């Protein structure tokens, strides 16, 4: 008897991988398939892409090391975006015409929090009272390119605009809130320290005490990419995330696993209309805006994304 196992081979960094886990899970659930997830840790830069699965609790999905037992596959040319909520809705609607985009989007929100959870290893290191903090996610060297894809990469001038606007918001938070608290995460420690110093200087100039939460990165068991996984789950616990970059699947994932609120500063750039942040506006409250379920809006903003690659062509019975 033919089984309904689907191999989902994951690529790139943590955000890309786990957003594809969510999209793949929702697609499989509606069409009655069982996802078997394969972490492609040997693709590209091994040190960056090798995430120790002992740092996670995965529910309702199977983590596999091969696709030998799977009769079906689910693939994507653009990890982290091909399986966004609209593209998954578009695919499922071929088989379930009564399904709504809002329903699929709500399932992304609900199921992501069920299927992807931190292990006890990570939970034990998440700081107390982190839910009071604004999470600031910084990226730098690998996201700045004047010749890059304007949908998700920053020109030098755009990056300066984004950081200045982020610091303006930080200043307003410091001025207006009673106990301003921040968590800062980045893959670039020098850049993280530079922004932390800027925030400290703002607080001194405003004669206001702030708290910057420190994370204990002690990794005595040498789990691969421990810091990144801990950063992501810590970020997910914050009351709101401020993206210090035009677009990043890492902080989108953290927001999806958290309270679904994120500030994105691409709205101040000339490339805002084509920024991939719009792909997630049905599952996140972006810049305090309500979630967007406008089909035409999402169809327009996913035109550049490659189609889902799969041999799934029916509901499995």
Image (cartoon, rainbow, N blue to C red):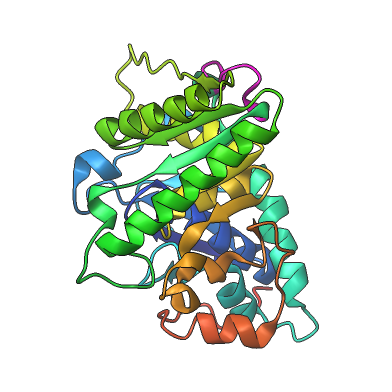
Q: Is residue 247 magenta?
A: no
Please state if 310 lies on the left or on the right of 96 as rendered: left
Please state if 1 lies on the left or on the right of 132 as rendered: left
Image position, residue 83 (x, y; %)? 51, 68
Front residue of 273/187: it is 273
Which quadrant holds the C terminus?
Answer: bottom right
Q: Which residues are magenta?
A: 123-131
Q: Is residue 302 above or below residue 203?
A: below
Please state if 172 lies on the left or on the right of 168 as rendered: right
Query: Which residue is at 69% across, 31% downward?
Result: 177
Which quadrant holds the N terminus?
Answer: bottom right
Confirm whether residue 154 shows in the render: no
Where residue 135 sits, quadrant-wise, is top right
Q: Is residue 78 above or below residue 230?
A: below
Image position, residue 16 (x, y; %)? 41, 56
Query: Which residue is at 69% across, 54% downward?
Result: 109
Q: Is residue 74 above or below residue 39?
A: below
Q: For the stretch drawn in magenta, what is the main secondary structure?
A: loop
Image position, residue 47 (x, y; %)? 21, 38
Q: Is residue 124 magenta?
A: yes
Where residue 174 sits, quadrant-wise, is top right
Image position, residue 14 (x, y; %)? 40, 46
Confirm whether residue 192 shows in the render: yes
Total tally of numbered discs in the picture = 0
Front residue of 7/100: it is 100
């Amino acid at each position: 008897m033919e089984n309904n196992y689907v191999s989902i081979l994951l690529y790139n960094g943590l955000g890309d991988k786990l957003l594809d886990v969510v999209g793949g899970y929702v697609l499989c659930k509606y069409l009655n398939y069982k996802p078997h997830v394969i972490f492609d840790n040997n693709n590209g830069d091994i040190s960056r892409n090798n995430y120790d699965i002992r740092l996670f609790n995965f529910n309702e999905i199977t983590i596999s090391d091969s696709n030998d037992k799977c009769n079906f596959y689910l693939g994507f040319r653009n990890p982290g975006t091909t399986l966004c909520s609209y593209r998954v809705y578009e695919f499922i609607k071929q088989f379930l015409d009564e399904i709504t985009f809002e329903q699929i989007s709500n399932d992304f929100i609900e199921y992501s929090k069920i299927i992807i959870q931190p292990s006890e290893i990570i939970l034990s290191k998440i700081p107390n009272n982190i839910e009071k903090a604004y999470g600031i996610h910084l990226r730098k060297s690998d996201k700045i390119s004047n010749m890059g894809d304007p949908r998700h990469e920053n020109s030098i001038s755009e990056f300066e605009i984004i950081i200045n606007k982020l610091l303006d918001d930080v200043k307003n938070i410091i001025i207006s809130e009673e106990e301003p608290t921040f968590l800062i995460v980045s893959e670039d420690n020098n850049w993280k320290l530079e922004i932390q110093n800027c925030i400290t200087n703002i607080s001194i100039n405003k004669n206001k005490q702030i708290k910057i939460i420190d994370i204990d990165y002690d990794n005595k068991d040498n789990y691969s990419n421990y810091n990144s996984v801990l950063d992501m789950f810590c970020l997910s616990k914050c009351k709101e995330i401020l993206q210090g970059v035009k677009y990043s699947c890492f902080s989108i994932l953290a927001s999806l696993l958290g309270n679904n609120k994120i500030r994105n500063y691409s709205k101040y750039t000339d490339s805002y209309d084509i920024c991939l942040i719009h792909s997630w506006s049905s599952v996140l409250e972006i810049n305090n805006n309500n979630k967007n379920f406008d089909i035409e809006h999402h169809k327009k903003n996913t035109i550049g994304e490659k189609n889902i690659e799969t041999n799934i062509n029916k509901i499995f019975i």
